[in-house]
């Protein structure tokens, strides 16, 4: 039976959640296909949970995720190859499509804390694709794609170094006599530490290590290394490998450690698309060295999409719960309202929904941009390639940083918006938050990435002073006009964010110059200007996110059904206004905006909350998360929150006996003074 408040919400909405769902899924066919695929898994008893996953031990969780992960991949592959037909070869698009099935809603529905085979596709196969020569791809790619004797992961980070990649200590020495590389972990801090699936799952890794040919240091390179025997799965001689232990979240990923002692691999297992070692020991850098970092760029790009889903999962749970939960009369003597009717509750939830929708538009744009840059890189026009890569790196760094930070923060706001019940593991905010906040750190820590973007921004700012043509993402730096507060509030807000960004970049640049004038070197100056540089990259990200959201929505809006266009326009506006208000410190620092104008934005913000209120439940229904994907007692479609909370408590293994054995062994002796 459906909760009556949710029934009422759905009946009175002015948008059709099905129309929204079709747009969200990329069309009716896509939606039907996704639903049919999900039902094949979610209705299959072999994918049911007997015991709540949160009640399993760390080891049991791992074993369960491998058992389920292999069944999942087997079934999914069959479905995917039928769908792809003859096109079932591994290229960038196919990989992204498949990876999305693993990490998007379907994968999430089956693995709330992720699973260890995920890295194989997102990082191992993508590295082979991006960094292997054609010959290497012929030898390895198809096997890897089909997991034929190969389960891989990506081993870059070490115990001592993660952010500063040049500081990695793993060594690969070329032995020309045997045409082999010898891999070594010279000390404790050189142990690889963190790679997903490394602990007990993977049998091959892409390893990043410092290449030495004789005495010559040839920089970091990537190597394909077998670490476990294909048949027995025992570690190869000289390999020391294991799991690093429980973490704040993502506890089924099987993150591992790895050390090498004189492990030999053939010469052709250095990934040689951009750099080669010839058999007689000559090192040739034939391509752009930075392409070694290509896998990281790929994952940063797709992470924006991953955290968008996590934010909207949490948003769906909080919205439905807030429509079911009734508490605290607004007027004395009146019935308790749905908590969603408290304006402050709307102000916690709706901006997160709007943010998620904005990330969706931006993530689509970013993926397109990434593909365009990859095509440019293939064309071998080195100047163009290097400019495009620099812009892609800068944009992806700041978007990944800000999106993961805001999504994690948003998920926690949504968790708190569910009061005490939000804190239950069965509400599932812990898993969702655990994954989103991991993304804040992995694939480039937040501050470290923002500093990368800031370097690019300062350079572009200096170019703008020289009247040079600027890349698309920063053309606004050429516009030095002041803010003219007009009728269009969205434009006022976006423009003021752009001005704040421009001025903050100018300030960061001035800070660097001041330090230089004091006689400090470039690096020390950068360090001392660090806070301003981070503020500049953050301001740029906000300006870019808002401008891109507005532009992308306007580009597609005419092709949408009016009700979908209407709610998306409200969400876009809410996102822009919310960003403006949250960044008010920066905005007011760099723009002349008076109290009346600020109030105008606040009033419109509150008006938008009221406009969205009647359609809130229909909107989150339109994201079309299956109950299994939400995995939450609070967020299920039928809204039977209290029944589910109680049923879940009763399933708890502790409640399977009326008296626990610890009563006899400890509590009773204590009460009888017999300890
Ligand atoms: C079903 C469930 C769903 C979800 C589950 C999720 C659960 C978890 C699953 C796991 C997922 C992901 C796994 C994560 C994997 C990893 O984390 S892999 C390790 C990633 N590591 C990093 O990202 C390290 C960050 N550090 C760096 O990238 C670089 O070292 C840094 C950029 C900081 C380099 O700094 P410098 O030392 O200053 O620069 P240098 O290396 O010398 O570079 C010189 C030059 O090059 C520019 N640059 C740097 N990087 C790039 C790049 N990638 N592309 C293009 N250009 C680049 C840099 O800006 C410099 O340019 P300039 O012109 O000199 O300014
Ligand atoms: C869940 C998870 C999964 C992961 N999966 C993998 C994987 O599959 N493969 C893999 O190779 N790695 C993986 N990693 C490792 C991850 O990429 C690194 O942890 C990440 O890049 C951050 O590096 P770090 O741990 O060295 O942090 P640190 O760099 O030590 O960061 C600590 C602090 O130092 C600051 N800091 C560091 N450098 C600077 C600087 N230049 N300027 C200013 N401040 C600085 C940071 O801002 C931060 O506040 C994973 C990590 C996590 C959490």
Image: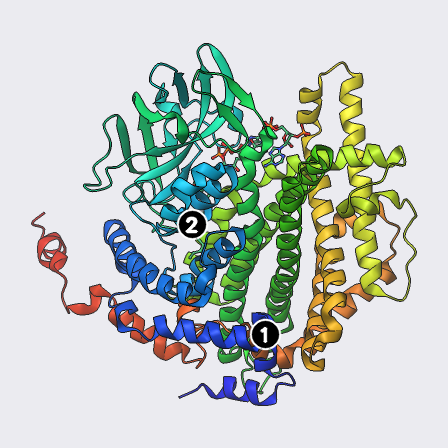
Colour setting: rainbow
Question: Considering the numbered disc 1 on the image, is that residue within a helix, a strand or a loop?
Answer: loop
- How crowded is the residue under tag 2: few (<14 C-alpha within 10 Å), some, or many (20+)? many
Residue 621's place in the image compared with 377, above or below, is below
- Res. 121 mark: 2
**Residue 648 visible in the snapshot:** yes
For the question of whether residue 599 can be seen, the reply is no
Which quadrant would residue 174 be assigned to in this image? top left
Where residue 290 sits, quadrant-wise, is top right
Pick the residue in front: 271 or 435.
Answer: 271
* Residue drawn at x 73%, y 40% as measured from the top left: 536
Q: Is residue 659 above or below residue 399?
A: below
Q: Nearer the viewer, residue 168 or 283?
A: 283
Residue 278 in percent (x, y) is at 47, 21
Q: CA distance from mark 1 to mark 2?
A: 26 Å
Q: In the picture shown, does residue 447 fall above or below 315?
A: above
Residue 70 horizontal side relative to residue 596, left or right: left
Q: Residue furthest top?
A: 215
| Residue 633, image x, y percentages | 39, 72
Query: Which numbered circle lies on residue 302?
Result: none
Quarter of the rendering occupied by the N terminus: bottom left
Left or right placement of residue 12 versus residue 169 in this view: right
Q: Which mark is residue 27?
A: 1
- At 57% from the left and 42% from the top, the residue drawn is 297
Q: Residue at x 28, y 51 (%)?
A: 62
User: Would you say the beta carbon of the disc 2 residue lies within 8 angstroms of ligand 1?
Assistant: no
Relative to 44, 624 lies left or right: right
Number of callouts in the render?
A: 2
Spot occupied by residue 198 in the image (x, y as percentages of width and height): 33, 40
- On screen, 224 above or below 177? below
Q: Earlier in the sequence, mark 1 or mark 2?
A: 1
* Residue at disc 2, secondary structure: helix
């Amino acid at each position: 039976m459906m909760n009556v408040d949710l029934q009422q919400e759905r009946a009175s909405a002015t948008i059709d959640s099905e129309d929204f769902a079709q747009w969200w899924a990329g069309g009716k066919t896509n939606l039907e296909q996704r639903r049919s695929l999900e039902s094949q898994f979610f209705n299959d008893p072999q994918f049911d949970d007997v015991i709540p996953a949160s009640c399993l031990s760390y080891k049991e969780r791992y074993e369960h995720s491998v058992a389920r992960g292999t069944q999942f991949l087997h079934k999914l592959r069959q479905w995917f190859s039928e769908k792809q037909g003859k096109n079932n070869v591994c290229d960038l698009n196919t990989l992204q499509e498949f990876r999305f099935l693993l990490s998007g809603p379907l994968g999430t529905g089956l693995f709330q804390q992720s699973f260890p085979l995920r890295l194989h596709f997102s990082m191992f196969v993508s590295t082979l694709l991006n960094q292997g020569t054609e010959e290497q791809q012929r030898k390895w790619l198809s096997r890897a794609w089909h997991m034929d004797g190969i389960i891989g992961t990506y081993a870059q980070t070490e115990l001592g170094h993660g952010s500063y990649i040049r500081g990695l200590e793993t060594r690969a020495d070329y032995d020309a006599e045997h045409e082999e590389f010898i891999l070594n972990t010279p000390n404790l801090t050189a142990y690889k530490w963190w790679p997903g699936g490394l602990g007990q799952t993977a049998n091959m890794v892409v390893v990043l290590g410092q290449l030495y040919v004789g005495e010559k240091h040839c920089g970091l390179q990537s190597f394909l290394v077998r670490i476990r025997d294909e048949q027995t799965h025992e570690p190869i001689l000289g390999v020391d490998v294991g799991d690093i232990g429980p973490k704040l979240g993502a506890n089924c990923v099987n993150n591992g450690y790895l050390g090498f002692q004189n492990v030999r691999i053939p010469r052709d297992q250095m990934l040689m698309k951009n750099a080669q070692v010839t058999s007689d020991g000559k090192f040739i850098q034939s391509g752009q060295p930075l392409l070694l970092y290509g896998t990281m760029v790929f994952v940063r790009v797709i992470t924006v999409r991953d955290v968008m889903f996590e934010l909207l999962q949490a948003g769906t749970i909080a919205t439905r719960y807030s429509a079911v939960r009734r508490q605290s009369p607004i007027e004395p003597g009146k019935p308790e309202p749905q908590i969603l009717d408290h304006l402050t509750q709307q102000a916690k939830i709706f901006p997160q929904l709007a943010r998620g929708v904005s990330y969706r538009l931006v993530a689509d744009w970013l993926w397109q941009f990434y593909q365009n840059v990859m095509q440019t890189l293939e064309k071998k026009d080195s100047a163009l390639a290097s400019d495009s890569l620099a812009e892609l790196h800068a944009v992806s760094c700041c978007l990944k940083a800000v999106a993961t930070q805001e999504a994690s923060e948003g998920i926690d706001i949504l968790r708190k918006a569910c009061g005490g019940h939000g804190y239950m593991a069965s509400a599932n905010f812990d898993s969702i938050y655990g994954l989103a906040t991991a993304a804040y750190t992995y694939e480039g820590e937040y501050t470290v990435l923002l500093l990368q973007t800031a370097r690019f921004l300062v350079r572009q700012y200096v170019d703008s002073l020289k009247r040079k043509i600027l890349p698309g993402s920063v053309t606004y730096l050429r516009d030095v006009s002041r803010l003219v507060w007009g009728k269009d509030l969205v434009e006022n807000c976006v423009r003021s964010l752009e001005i704040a960004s421009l001025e903050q970049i100018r300030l960061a640049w001035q800070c660097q110059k001041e330090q230089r004038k004091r006689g400090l070197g470039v690096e020390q100056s950068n360090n001392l200007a660090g806070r301003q540089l981070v503020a500049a990259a953050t301001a740029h990200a906000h300006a870019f996110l808002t401008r891109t959201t507005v532009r992308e929505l306007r580009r597609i809006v005419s092709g949408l059904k009016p009700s979908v266009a209407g709610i998306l326009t409200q969400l876009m506006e809410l996102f822009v206004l919310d960003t403006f208000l949250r960044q008010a410190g920066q905005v007011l620092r760099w723009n002349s905006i008076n109290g009346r104008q600020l109030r105008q934005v606040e009033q419109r913000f509150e008006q938008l909350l009221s406009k969205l209120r009647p359609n809130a439940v229909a909107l989150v229904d339109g994201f079309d998360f299956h109950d299994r994907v939400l995995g939450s007692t609070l967020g299920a479609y039928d809204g039977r929150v209290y029944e589910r909370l109680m049923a879940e408590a009763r399933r708890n293994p502790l409640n399977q006996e009326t008296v626990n054995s610890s009563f006899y062994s400890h509590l009773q002796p204590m009460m009888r003074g017999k300890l």
